[in-house]
Image (cartoon, grey):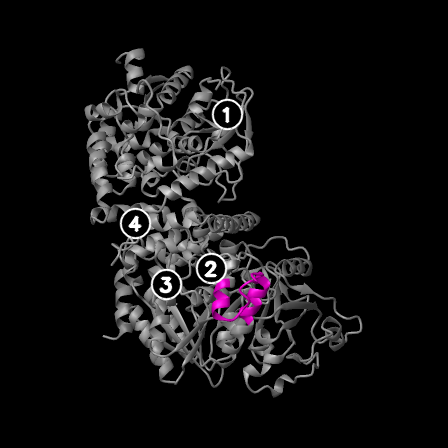
Amino acid sequence: MRAALFIPCYVDAFFPEVGIATLELLERLGVEVVYPLNQTCCGQPMGNAGCHDDAAATEALFVRNFTGYDYIVTPSGSCTHHVRENLTAIPQTADTVKVRQRTYELVEFVHDVLQVREFPWAEFPHVVGLHNGCASLRALRTAKMSEIGEPPFSKPLDLLSKVKGIRFVTPERPDECCGFGGTFSVFEEPVSAKMGYDKVNDHRNAGAEYIVSGDMSCIMHQKGCAERLDLPIKFIHIAQILNGARE
Amino acid sequence: MSSRDDVLARVRRNQPAPRPLPAVPTFDTDPGSSLERFKTAVLRMGGKVADPPADGDLDNLIGRLFPDAKVICSATPELVGNRPIGEVREPADLDDVDVGVVRAVYGVAETGSLWLTEAEFRVNTLGFLAQHLVVLLDPSRIVGNLHHAYRERAQFDAGYGVFMTGPSATADIEGVLIHGAQGIRTLTVVPVAAGSK
Amino acid sequence: MKRIDHAEGSSKFIKAKDHLDFHDKRLWDLRKKRDRESEHLPEWEELRTLASAIKEHTLTHLADYLEEFERNATRNGAHVHWAKDAAEHNQIVFEIMSARNARTLVKAKSMLTDECEMRPFLANRGIEVMETDLGERIQQLDDEPPSHIVVPAVHKLKTDVARVFSENIGTDPKNSDVHYLAESQRQHTRPYFLKADAGMTGANFAVAETGTVVVCTNEGNADLSVHLPKLYIASIGIEKVIPRIEHLGVFIRMLSRSALGSPITQLTSHFRVPREGTEMHIVLVDNGRSERLGMSDFWYSLKCIRCGACMNTCPVYRRSGGLSYGATYSGPIGVIIDPTFNLRKYSSLPFASTLNGSCTAVCPVRINIHEQIYKWRQIIAERHQLPFVKQQAMKVAGKVLSNPKLYRAAVEGAGAGIEHLPRFTIYSRFNAWGKQREVPSAPQFTFRQWYVKNRGKK
């Protein structure tokens, strides 16, 4: 099976280790991974700001880069959501429609397409708080959301729970938004920072040593908050744990 | 063009394509004892429940429940009280009533609600100016939930009707629950069949 | 008209730590109570679908239902008036009252009357209006608008209420016991009920089948407002109509559960016929609703039953307070309807959101709130109502991110992390990211650089 790898701009720039872990993980699981070299971004920053026109060229580039693959995988719930639901600044050609339909978030891909549950090489002997980014949670439905009384389910936990040594703690507000929200983090900085502080304190108070998420954008924001607060809490992406990172 | 015509014309022009009206089921669950469910619900909403007197003397019951009450006004002939409701001329005249007594038409087990109309109040302010309200409820007249309650279609021909659920309340200040906001301070349900003595 | 700056309003709110903590916890508690109720009813999601469908049906047949309501209300003996806009609503209310020499009005909570700014209009014409809902009364006395559509003074602590009451109704400024304060307002308000010339309510629902006005309260102030004075005025937005009595089963089951996590409000009142010797007037108000009905992306907002669940769940609202939105309707529902009142003034509101979608998930009538927020952003950008800084940042971002070479130049290379942040995050003059957060440090290489070095070109 062949898949194209999309690495979000902020992962490329700030958290290449997450991209590396994603690539290595997919290869361990038997996927032939292709990384189109001219990729940049999915267009979400402009799209979420309402700047449809400004997003168009980036979205078109995305489609050009990822046309012709059966699967496009990315370690980002919010980017996946943007591609599948909001890549609308460009004409909806057959290629565009296909690219949109074939884009998967990493957990979703491993869980639903590859249907893998065991990662024998993985070990993470730490106390962990799981953070599901809101796009992953409510748009991509990666787990039960607290607003809806449905039977509990969680794709991330399905993947992580068998990792050797891992222990989970639950914060008081498990799926309250952490406050990143893209440009919100800058243009509504007071509320954004308060939300981030509340989120990391909540995990810390529950006893988490690590916060793990499938969304590095959330992590980037929470990490910035935790560091400013001098909070002894560490951050890691799901791909890294599943790929065998020990810390 | 009158405002009425203007508004209606604009609404007509802008109405989106028609959507169908769904049928509303009654969502019946296995009810168990309606009276027990009702009691649990009304207690949860801050109401009280008093056992009917063994001797059937409701006036005496009121006297025991409200020993300090001076003015007792009953809208039901099952109780006498000391302020004849038939002599009330203005709604405001009930301002000094300590205890009002009415009989509900029926109760709703889901919520602990009591349905009362102008016929049961005789003077509507009895249910709101009285400091305390006692409501007689026939235990055989409890419907399961609000879907059933709202299918008692004839009841909604009343000029005024209200589902009363516990006493008046507010939590507007720091979320602290207060009973006796603008209306009654306490509501006591006495489950007793109509016409029993 | 001055643009509302939500971020600035929120900044002030956040600085008052005790108020912020209480506000956030109190409303989160209401959200949790809602969850308990919704989990208790296995049919909850089905009820949401029904409520949504009934509203959509009604709105797509609204003219017919409005006429049916008018017919039945008139047959009941009520007078039905129509107001195109807020100004006409206020004028109609004034004329109804002054024609009968009515100088005092007791009213129950009505967001519509706040929207129409009725109180100052009437006050300027010599009519004394008393808000009888405790929360609304506190706000009236403090000359502040309500901050939440269900709990209007939720942003205040009891010490604030003690101050407001001591300054206005003669309570002891040192006594902030909540029972004392509530009892004081009860005692102070009661004589006004007894003597008022007129009483007013809004409507949670207006039933076309019977001409019934349905008002849900906990305090009993709506009933006192209607049963005592000889004149009753009901102000009703045209979107409040529902077809039949039986539909109330769905809405009444959902309203208080969504709002407060209680199965029903203490009073659910159905006003249909004026009692003998009195008059009942109904004012049906448009004020932009008919226009919103024609907006294909936004007409779902008319389904709103004003439960406030979206406000309770919104992490932004809980940390910024309703007053920071500068509008009658705040929180998520406010964000999607206020731009229809004034696009420029409220252009920052759709950005007071992280698009997390919690509001949509709790809305009892399935309004797609966060999707409408997203669409409003596009309209605001198209109509050049974005702040200049953001406009420019997005233009630059759009150019850099669509050009692989430019993009790589921006992210590759050594240097402080701040230079390599996607440009939009540093474009604000004040370097907002770094105010309360550390900036991510630049790693030695980008992913692409690692890939090219370690995996070669494929």
Instruction: Specify which label sits upstream in the sequence, 3 or 4.
Output: 3
Instruction: Specify which label sits upstream in the sequence, 2 or 3.
Output: 2
Instruction: Specify which label sits upstream in the sequence, 4 or 2.
Output: 2
Crowding around mark 2 (Cα neighbors within 10 Å: few <14, some 14 to 19, many 20+) is many
Q: Amino acid at mark 1?
A: Leu
Q: What is the residue that sits farthest to the front in this orientation?
A: C174
Instruction: Kindly identify which numbered label has been placed on residue C153.
Output: 2
Q: Amino acid at mark 4?
A: Ser
Q: Amino acid at mark 3?
A: Glu
Q: Closer to the observer: label 4 or label 1?
A: 4
Magenta stretch: give its range.
C163-186
| Secondary structure state at the residue bearing disc 3 | helix
Residue contact at pointers 4 and 2, CB within 8 angstroms: no
Image position, residue C411 (x, y; %): 26, 24
Q: Amino acid at mark 2?
A: Ala
Label 2, label 1: how far apart the Cα atoms are: 44 Å
Determine which residue is flagged by label 1: A160
Label 3, label 4: how far apart the Cα atoms are: 26 Å
Is A10 left or right of C310, judged from the image as shown? left
Crowding around mark 4 (Cα neighbors within 10 Å: few <14, some 14 to 19, many 20+) is many
Q: Closer to the observer: label 3 or label 1?
A: 1
Instruction: Kindly identify which numbered label has been placed on residue C348.
Output: 4
| Secondary structure state at the residue bearing disc 4 | loop
Instruction: Kindly identify which numbered label has been placed on residue C16.
Output: none
